[in-house]
Image: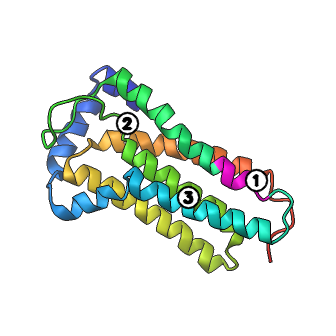
Amino acid sequence: MITWQIAADGPLLRLDERLSRALVHPDRFSELLADLGNVQVAVPVLLTVLLYVAWRGRASGTDRWWPAPLAAAVLMALVPALIVPVKELIARGGTPAVPPGTGYYPSGHTATAMIAYGASTLVLLPWLRTSYARRGAVAICVLLVACVSFGLVRRGYHWPLDVVASWCLGTVLLALLRLFLGRFSSEPQPK
């Protein structure tokens, strides 16, 4: 529905533009928050977690230690393959705070942050021993994605609907990853 509203210049688009005008206030702090969604920041976090999970799985003697890290890595690789064609097709212009151009919808930074931090959390959860640690990991993931989202809109890099569309895509992709990972939950858990 969001994509249709953007492509058809629907009423939701005008609301998005009004909301953006109210929220945009470019400053250094919002830029730093937005930078947490950069590939150069988010992907190394994911790779570090994937290497840790693979190492722990292999060291524990788990027979199938590799599907979770591999699935998360493939999911991260899918992000540009899904986002770039939509950016090209919709060709939405940026906010007044950025140079003229197109390709702002959906937000690649938000999708990168959601998948990198979300997939990191999903593959790490089985290795966290306490429910407090698991809740903490989920809270950190949600906080990071929220900070990136806020930074992108506040800095004026993206319209709010650009970010919301990436939340929708990220939620679907992470749900699919969770379903895939659930297939391996019957294996003995690490001690």
- Residue holding disc 2: 106
Q: Amino acid at mark 1?
A: Gly
Mark seen at residue 182: 1
As for residue 69 lying within the magenta part, the answer is yes
Q: Tell me where residue 120 appears, x and y as whole percent.
A: 57, 60
Q: CA distance from mark 3 to mark 2?
A: 24 Å
Q: Tell me where residue 174 appears, x and y as whole percent.
A: 59, 48
Residue 101 left/right relative to 103? left
Task: Please tell me whether residue 171 is drawn above or below residue 63 in the rendered image.
Answer: above
The kind of secondary structure element at disc 3 is helix
The kind of secondary structure element at disc 2 is loop
What stretch of residues is rendered in magenta? 65-71
- Residue holding disc 3: 47
Q: CA distance from mark 3 to mark 1?
A: 21 Å
Q: CA distance from mark 1 to mark 2?
A: 29 Å
Q: Nearer the viewer, residue 77 or 6?
A: 77
The kind of secondary structure element at disc 1 is helix
Q: Amino acid at mark 3?
A: Leu
Please identify the quarter of the rendering in which residue 77 is found.
top right
